[in-house]
Amino acid sequence: MDGSTFLSWEFILIFAYLSIGLLIATFMRKQLLFLQRLMIPNAIIAGIIVLLFSQQVFGLVTISLDNLYFLIYHLLTGVFICLGLRKPIYKHSRGIFTTAVIICKGYTVLALVGLVLTLIWVKFLFPNFPPSFSMLPLLGFGFDQITALNIGLQWEQFGLPGGGRAGFSFGVMGLLWAYLGGIILANWARRRRQTDDRTEPAPEALQGIIARDGEKPVGGRLTTTAEGIESFTLHLALIGFVFLVTYALMNWTSAWLGSIGNLGQLFGNILWQYNFVFGAILAYTVRKIIDWLDLGYLFDDGLIARASGSMLDYLIAAGVASIPLLIYSSYWVEVVIFSLLCGVVLLFFIKFASLKMQPDYPLERAVSTFGLLTGTITAGLALLRMVDPRLETPVAEDLGFASGLSLLVGLPALVLINLPLTGFVTGEPLRYLFISLGLFAGYAVLLFLAWFLPVRWKVGKLNLKKSGS
């Protein structure tokens, strides 16, 4: 009897396809000079290979996108659990809040670009153009293609024909910007930093493989004996324990919110999308308890880093392989034009904001935030991997916590997205487009003040101390 008739091979085959992609990518980078010059992580190359082999392009293998999304969801949680289990090195201070502010200001940039272009479309080109189209770049770029699809489908009932598919198309364009535009940004910034520091990457870093006679770094230290348990198994067991605690907490929280009513149930469903944030918080708490019990000697940061790195490689490969290559034909001109302008404006905004608002690790913060704001947090981690290969800076953790915090800070943006639709329903599209433009601009100013005033107060306090001494 064929084993596939009663055993599911779905996730094992996905694991196998991604593994083959990683093997091929490692060989290609070792042999091809242009890949070495670009210094693209092997996981991104592997994801492109799997994407090309999938049913979306050449059709050599069939991979369920839904199963890929499930895998990405759990691997993302695993990566942040590992980050939380490491011994704390940095104090995050305002890094999380500043990143959240930049993310939410990025939402306003996307909304403002969408509103201005829609105003031009309605005023000079197509008077009956649906004003709700202006919010689709924010939903597709700033959130993801699934969110844009669902909200676009709701708007179809109120005069946005094909809104779901148009929103999905913006999500696809955002992912392309995240990986293609992000890779260009990361390479440009990294080469500029190398020029300023007058350093060149080592040949091994370019090829991605340590030479045969090269010194092999120690990846981790054993904390147990083989007679008892394999050390790496013990570390995986700890990660699995945090996974279970995270699931239990999320399940209890969503059930409690669901008992409140429909709004609570909706918010509970949204919280599941930020499972990785709760995983990181619980992992950080578990690490504190372990250290308090004086059991830290049982767990080695090197082995935790190996587990995190492996999960991240598969996460990035799966994230690239899951890019849906679909653009809605009825709006393809608007989708392409709006997406190009949104991507360019966002690129300059992130570069400027990272330099001015986050002088520590500006390169790492810029590329990761750009990936998040155009695609998903997976894209942000993939780009961060290009400039911070071992995730040694606090940027990855700041990005994860900030993405969760931005859900709260960005609530006004989610409330305002329905204003253009109100203008269409009331027959005053231009008026409500201008009102939306003013409210989003005001929201951007408030975000800046919420960040700027505490900074100025802190600087003024330090200056008083210095003058008093």
Image (cartoon, rainbow, N blue to C red):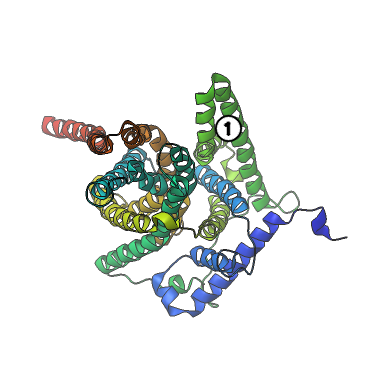
Which of the 4 image quadrants contains residue 455?
Answer: top left
Mark 1 residue type: Met
Q: Which residue corresponds to mark 1?
A: 250
Badge 1 crowding class, 10 Å Cα cut-off, few under 14, some 14 to 19, many 20 or more, is many
- Looking at the picture, tell me which residue is in the foreground, 404 or 309: 404
Q: Residue 418: where, in percent of width, then height?
A: 36, 34
Q: Is residue 468 above or below residue 239?
A: above
Lateral position of residue 96 relative to residue 281, left or right: left
Which of the 4 image quadrants contains residue 15?
Answer: bottom right
Q: Residue 137: where, in percent of width, then height?
A: 36, 48
| Residue ID at (54%, 21%) | 261
| Residue ID at (58%, 20%) | 259
Q: Is residue 259 above or below residue 348?
A: above
Lateral position of residue 217 relative to residue 60, left or right: left
Note whether residue 215 is visible: yes
- Looking at the picture, tell me which residue is in the foreground, 274 or 112: 112
Q: Residue 421: where, in percent of width, then height?
A: 35, 36
Q: Residue furthest right?
A: 1
Q: Residue furthest left?
A: 467
Q: Residue 383: where, in percent of width, then height?
A: 41, 58
Note whether residue 392 is visible: no
| Residue ID at (57%, 72%) | 24
Which quadrant, please, contains the N terminus?
Answer: bottom right
